[in-house]
Image (tube, helix red, strand yellow):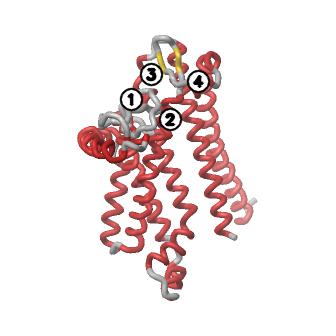
Amino acid sequence: MISSPGLRERNDDKTFRIAVLLIALASVALCAALGIELAKGSSLAWAKFGFSFLTGREWNPVTEQFGALPFIYGTAASSLIALLISVPLGIGSAIFLAEIAPRKLSAVLCFMIELLAAIPSVIIGLMGIFVLVPAVRWIEPFLTKHLSWLPFFTGAPYGVGLLAAGLILSVMMLPYITSISRELLLAVPQPLKEGMLGLGSTRWEMVRHVCLPYARSGILGAVFLALGRALGETMAVTMVIGNTPKISLSLLAPAYTMSAVIANELAEATSDIYTHSLVGVALALFLITFIVNGVARLLVRGLTEEHAR
């Protein structure tokens, strides 16, 4: 018996739907397995310290007192500094590449920016040690002289610290924000732009009132994608942040991040509680990344629904 084309098409659709469903469930199962494994690997730390593991400030392997707050602070502060630098630079660069620069120049510059995203983080870390840290060390005396009345610019000019880490992270976040935002701005329908210009608006007014509102949900998604890269970055940050588990409001002070302490100390963990504490830091980083991505999805969904209305 020969099956009809319509029946064969329905069977193919059903097979395709089951296949992609299994792939999606495999991704969910992988994330769940990772979370369960991290929870099991850090059980001793949670049993001994409880919630104070996340709020404790002391990290002392000798006395076996472990608190992850300095690492959470270092990760959050360095990522926030990077966001404050990379978001305006990235969106501004995307506007220039999409709306102002000649197409040939835009293509060349976009290729160079995307190439920056492919550079290994250890090479960017070396650039940070030999170029960025000396530059920061040179500018820090000026900051302490003129802005020492602010708690963010006090202390000795080490060169390594939160400021250097934020700058190196902004370099790593910039390609994601710029290239994705550029593609989104290029996807804005041309009649909308021409209509705004035809009403007598300037190019800036067209970008502000048409392009950015149209692409804002996608741009927000690009920002959070770059933030996810910053939260999990290890090598480059480890090489320039100073790796000191202390909390200080000063951007000039050394700090420590969650991924850096795992990379630096896991091979040196000599006791079960030490190992479980490091895995506990990994679990905290996993949960923070999960929460950030969830918040990003909600914000993007809200902006998308608002735009649809």
Q: Name which residue type carries label 1.
A: Asn
Disc number lying in front (3 or 2): 2
Q: Name which residue type carries label 2.
A: Tyr
Q: CA distance from mark 3 to mark 2?
A: 20 Å
Q: Position of residue 279 (x, y in %)?
A: 53, 24
Q: Residues within 10 Å of mark 4 (few under 14, many from 20)?
A: many
Residue on which disc 4 sits:
53
Residue 243, numbered label: 1
Residue 213, numbered label: none
- The answer to whether marks 1 and 2 mark residues whose Cβ atoms lie closer than 8 Å is no
Q: Residues within 10 Å of mark 3 (few under 14, many from 20)?
A: some
Could you tell me which quadrant the C terminus lies in? Answer: bottom right
* Circle nearer the N terminus (3, 4): 4
Residue 73, numbered label: 2
Could you tell me which quadrant the N terminus lies in? Answer: bottom right
* Circle nearer the N terminus (4, 2): 4
In the rendered picture of this protein, how many numbered marks are placed on residues?
4
Q: Is residue 302 left or right of residue 97?
A: right
* Circle nearer the N terminus (1, 2): 2
> Which residue lies at the image location 61% right of the left edge and 57% below the top edge?
300
Q: Where is 88 relative to 239, above or below?
A: below
Disc number lying in front (1 or 3): 1
The one nearer the camera, 165 or 275, is 165
Q: Position of residue 284 (x, y in %)?
A: 57, 32
Q: Name which residue type carries label 4.
A: Phe
Q: Name which residue type carries label 3.
A: Leu
The one nearer the camera, 35 or 232, is 232
Residue on which disc 3 sits:
266
* Circle nearer the N terminus (3, 2): 2
